[in-house]
């Protein structure tokens, strides 16, 4: 554990819970319910708002925006673009989750349009980040087929090119701004067995960036650590993926700063 990073992450954990930030989530049909419950349990206030008629207006009100392309369609993409533009105009951070962006031309084109709108943070699994860097990933759909270490170089390159924070998640997470690099260990091997875990994490990254606008790197580390700590705790009582889902939400809700600080496994590289 790197003490400074752990202390900062714990401070941001306390601030996020005390602030209850409003997070504008444009996420997929699969994730909407679980992601909203995860944010509530963690101490944030989620709002799922995707239609272009209101997404732009709402992004200006919320503390942060998160955009996930999991189940996209033209009307939704219009809403994502309007929301990202509005977040930029209002000076609000926004987080991109490029779910399976390599799988189809429509997804690739949509992610290219969204990347032009300068996301503050890009959070994906290893296959998604490798493919964003132009590499050949083993992923086929929404689940990763690659280890995180294999995505680290692509993540650094992407972070520098986009001037964004890039988070690669998996067994041990990796966060980079192109210069600074951090690994976060913990969590549980049950986490990839539950759909929408990554999407929910993206929403929580939004919550942390909302309360630390000028510290997106530290905010991203704090969000990933929050998940790793709650995941480690949930794994102790879970019997499998279904009971893990509820134990994880309870773990987020019941977490205190001392346990967060004592369980965090953050390593600066
Ligand atoms: N094998 C694992 N061990 C511990 N934590 C994991 C493991 N795989 C994924 N996670 C955690 O699950 C969460 C979602 O990550 P991931 O599965 O990579 O996203 P996605 O669902 O988008 O593919 C992250 O908090 C990550 O650290
Ligand atoms: C199964 C599925 N299909 C389209 S989006 C989605 C959810 C993906 O969730 P996650 O990326 O968090 O595993
Ligand atoms: Mg995902």
Image (cartoon, helix red, strand yellow):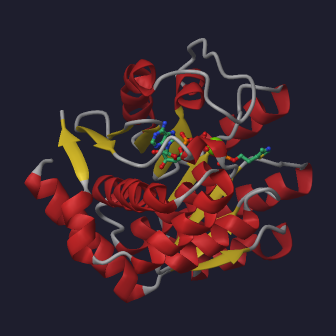
- The quarter in which the C terminus is drawn is top left
Judge by depth and name the residue closer to the eye, 7 or 207: 7
Residue drawn at point x = 71 percent, y = 34 percent: 100
Task: Give the vertical position of 139 relative to 11 (above or below).
Answer: above
At horizontal 84% and vertical 69% (from top left) the residue drawn is: 51
- How many numbered discs, if any? 0
For the point 55% across and 55% down, which residue is it? 202
The image quadrant that residue 232 belongs to is bottom left
In the rendered image, the residue lying farthest to the top is 136
Find the residue positioned furthest to the right: 74
Residue 98 seen by the camera: yes
Q: Residue 21 at x, y = what percent? A: 48, 81
Left or right, residue 106 beside residue 15: right
Look at the picture and state if 95 lies above or below 138: below
Foreground residue among 29 and 165: 29
Q: Nearer the viewer, residue 269 or 65?
A: 269
Q: Residue 213: x and y, percent? A: 36, 67
Image spot of residue 257 (x, y percent): 25, 75
């Amino acid at each position: 554990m790197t003490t400074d990073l752990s202390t900062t992450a714990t401070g941001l954990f306390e601030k996020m819970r005390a602030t209850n930030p409003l997070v504008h989530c444009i996420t997929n049909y699969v994730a909407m319910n679980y992601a909203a419950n995860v944010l509530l349990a963690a101490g944030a206030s989620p709002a799922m708002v995707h239609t272009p008629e209101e997404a732009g207006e709402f992004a200006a009100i919320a503390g942060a925006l998160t955009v996930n392309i999991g189940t996209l369609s033209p009307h939704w993409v219009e809403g994502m673009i309007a929301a990202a533009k509005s977040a930029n105009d209002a000076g609000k951070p926004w987080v991109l989750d490029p779910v399976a962006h390599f799988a189809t031309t429509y997804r690739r084109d949509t992610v290219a349009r969204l990347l032009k709108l300068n996301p503050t943070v890009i959070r994906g699994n290893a296959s998604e980040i490798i493919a964003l860097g132009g590499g050949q990933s083993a992923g086929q759909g929404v689940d990763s087929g690659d280890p995180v270490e294999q995505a680290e170089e692509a993540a650094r390159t992407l972070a520098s090119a986009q001037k964004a924070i890039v988070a690669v998640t998996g067994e041990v997470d990796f966060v980079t701004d192109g210069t600074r690099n951090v690994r976060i260990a913990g969590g549980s091997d049950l986490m990839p067995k539950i759909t929408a875990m990554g999407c929910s994490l993206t929403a929580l990254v939004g919550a942390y960036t909302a309360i630390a606008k000028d510290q997106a790197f530290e905010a991203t580390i704090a969000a990933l650590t929050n998940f790793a700590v709650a995941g480690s705790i949930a794994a102790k009582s879970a019997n499998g993926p279904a009971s893990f889902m509820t134990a994880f939400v309870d773990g987020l809700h019941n977490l205190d700063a001392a346990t967060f600080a004592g369980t965090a496994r953050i390593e600066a590289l």
